[in-house]
């Protein structure tokens, strides 16, 4: 009897130990992420990536240091190659991103994502060395954080360059009097060069958000068509579609939309307005896509005020954009939302074209001979449009502006010309004058230029 009690006690003890060990080896469920761990995204677009072999460095700075989980890159146009990439912490430490080291040449729309950055330090900058293939590519950079929304701005990495030794002064010839310094024109200040890439410092870009909301609108519109009228499913789909459309309108009217690249807003507006034709007039879906399309295309016109100084590198790119808007205006029915919007966009670009060209002349130090070539080109392109249209009036104003700038530059240069040089220019202007009809802008211009060259002032 005593032996049976001892054996029973040992068996019970071993059973208890087995249960305890099995319970200890059971893994705990992962913690539920709290509100502070929700994914926050910040996006920015780097325009016109260089085509130079080896690429160039582009810096994306954060307005405030934020802990990042990962970084994603995607080419929006053309092909692109990433040579290397890294992030800079708030302790001035550089962390290389292995996935951005010497990538293959990727097509537009392909995402290149980093792994988890595995650092709890705040990130203050993202450096990317990128190169375009086949044309100038635009690169979208997306930063992901569980702390807060990263606010990204564009900058430029400054590379150390050795100081150039000063050139010694050239000795003055005793038999040749020193030429006096040319006085600076009071109306021609030394202006900075075109800002280039760092001029488009978009802190925000709503196009990615608009694209996601448009997809949500598509889903709710389909659910309305699939549900019976008056049912719970139908009413819920209608409510959600209207709520999503209202959110799109609020984004389009926000200040963030004004700092979004205009071609992104144009693509979003075109997509929304094209979907209007998929639904019957007066339906919930028709009204939703029509309202949002109008709001986004109105935001496009407003965004031109912000993007003019950084999106267009020269007058020709600005004119091409205006001509593109004219073509889209003519392809739309008169009086429609698209017609009026593209008409307003073209008018805004054409209105500033003369002053934009004036800035280009000063920045690139164009001579009167270069300006004359531009002037004749403007006059020739004017004749491609009917009298009184936007295109005709724009190129007429550009021709007149070029005439004024050319004569102003000629007056500055002619005092330093020899009599023989002035005589040659007089003959040249006389020949050019006879190539145009009497009383036209170009005829009068070359008459005035001939008088300036002949009189020496």
Image (cartoon, rainbow, N blue to C red):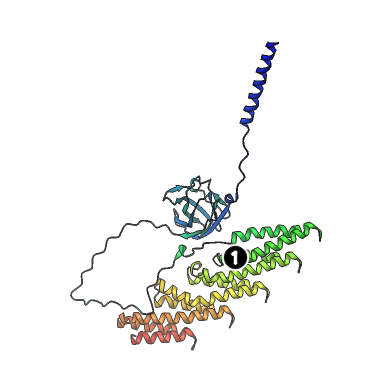
- Residue 86 at x, y percent in the picture: 46, 50
Outermost left residue: 174
- Residue 420 sits in which quadrant? bottom left
Q: Nearer the viewer, residue 136 or 175?
A: 136
Q: The N terminus appears in which quarter of the rendering?
A: top right
Left or right of residue 386, residue 49 in this image: left
Q: Is residue 28 above or below residue 84?
A: above
Residue at image position (52%, 69%) is 306
Residue 155 visible here: yes
Bin the neighbour count of mark 1 within 10 Å (Cα to Cα): few under 14, some 14-19, many 20 and up. many
Outermost bottom residue: 439
Outermost front residue: 2
Q: Nearer the viewer, residue 16 or 91?
A: 16
Residue at image position (41%, 68%) is 193
Task: Tell me the element at label 1.
Answer: helix
Q: Is residue 191 above or below residue 160?
A: below
Q: Is residue 423 above or below residue 143?
A: below
- Residue 364 sits in which quadrant? bottom left
Residue 128 visible here: no
Q: The C terminus appears in which quarter of the rendering?
A: bottom left
State how many labels appear: 1
- Residue 310 at x, y percent in the picture: 49, 67
- Residue 240 sits in which quadrant? bottom right
User: For mark 1, what is the residue?
Assistant: 265
- Residue 116 at x, y percent in the picture: 53, 46
- Residue 365 at x, y percent in the picture: 39, 73
């Amino acid at each position: 009897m005593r032996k049976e009690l001892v054996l029973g006690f040992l068996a019970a003890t071993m059973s208890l130990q087995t249960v305890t060990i099995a319970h200890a080896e059971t893994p705990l469920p992962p913690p539920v992420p709290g509100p502070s761990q929700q994914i926050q995204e910040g996006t920015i677009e780097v325009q016109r990536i260089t085509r130079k072999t080896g690429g160039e460095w582009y810096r994306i700075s954060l307005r405030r240091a934020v802990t990042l989980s990962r970084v994603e890159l995607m080419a929006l146009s053309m092909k692109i190659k990433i040579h290397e990439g890294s992030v800079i912490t708030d302790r001035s430490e550089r962390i290389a991103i292995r996935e951005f080291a010497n990538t293959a040449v990727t097509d537009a729309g392909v995402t290149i994502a980093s792994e988890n950055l595995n650092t709890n330090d705040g990130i203050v900058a993202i450096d990317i060395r990128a190169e375009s293939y086949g044309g100038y590519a635009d690169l979208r950079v997306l930063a992901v954080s569980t702390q807060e929304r990263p606010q990204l701005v564009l900058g430029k990495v400054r590379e150390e360059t050795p100081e150039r030794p000063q050139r010694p002064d050239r000795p003055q010839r005793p038999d040749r009097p020193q030429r006096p310094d040319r006085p600076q024109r009071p109306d021609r200040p030394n202006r900075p060069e075109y800002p280039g890439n760092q001029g488009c410092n978009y802190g925000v870009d709503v196009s990615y958000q608009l694209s996601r909301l448009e997809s949500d609108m598509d889903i709710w519109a389909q659910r309305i068509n699939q549900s019976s009228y008056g049912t719970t499913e139908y009413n819920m789909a209608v409510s959600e579609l209207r709520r999503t459309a209202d959110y799109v309108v609020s984004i389009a009217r926000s200040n963030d939309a004004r700092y979004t690249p205009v071609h992104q807003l144009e693509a979003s507006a075109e997509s929304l307005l094209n979907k209007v034709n998929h639904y019957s007039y007066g339906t919930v879906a028709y009204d939703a896509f029509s309202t949002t399309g109008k709001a986004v295309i109105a935001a496009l016109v407003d965004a031109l005020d912000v993007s003019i100084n950084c999106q267009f590198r020269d007058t020709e790119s600005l004119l091409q954009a205006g001509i593109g808007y004219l073509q889209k205006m003519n392809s739309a029915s008169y009086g429609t939302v698209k017609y009026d919007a593209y008409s307003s966009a073209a008018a805004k670009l054409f209105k500033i074209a003369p002053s934009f060209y004036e800035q280009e002349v000063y920045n690139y130090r164009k001579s009167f001979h270069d300006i004359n070539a531009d002037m004749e080109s403007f006059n020739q392109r004017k004749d491609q449009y009917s009298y009184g249209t936007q295109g005709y009036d724009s190129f007429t104003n550009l021709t007149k502006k070029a005439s004024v700038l050319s004569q102003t530059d000629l007056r500055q240069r002619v005092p330093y010309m020899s009599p023989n040089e002035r005589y040659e220019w007089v003959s040249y202007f006389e020949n050019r004058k006879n190539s145009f009809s009497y009383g036209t802008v170009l005829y009068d211009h070359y008459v005035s230029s001939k008088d300036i060259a002949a009189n020496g002032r």
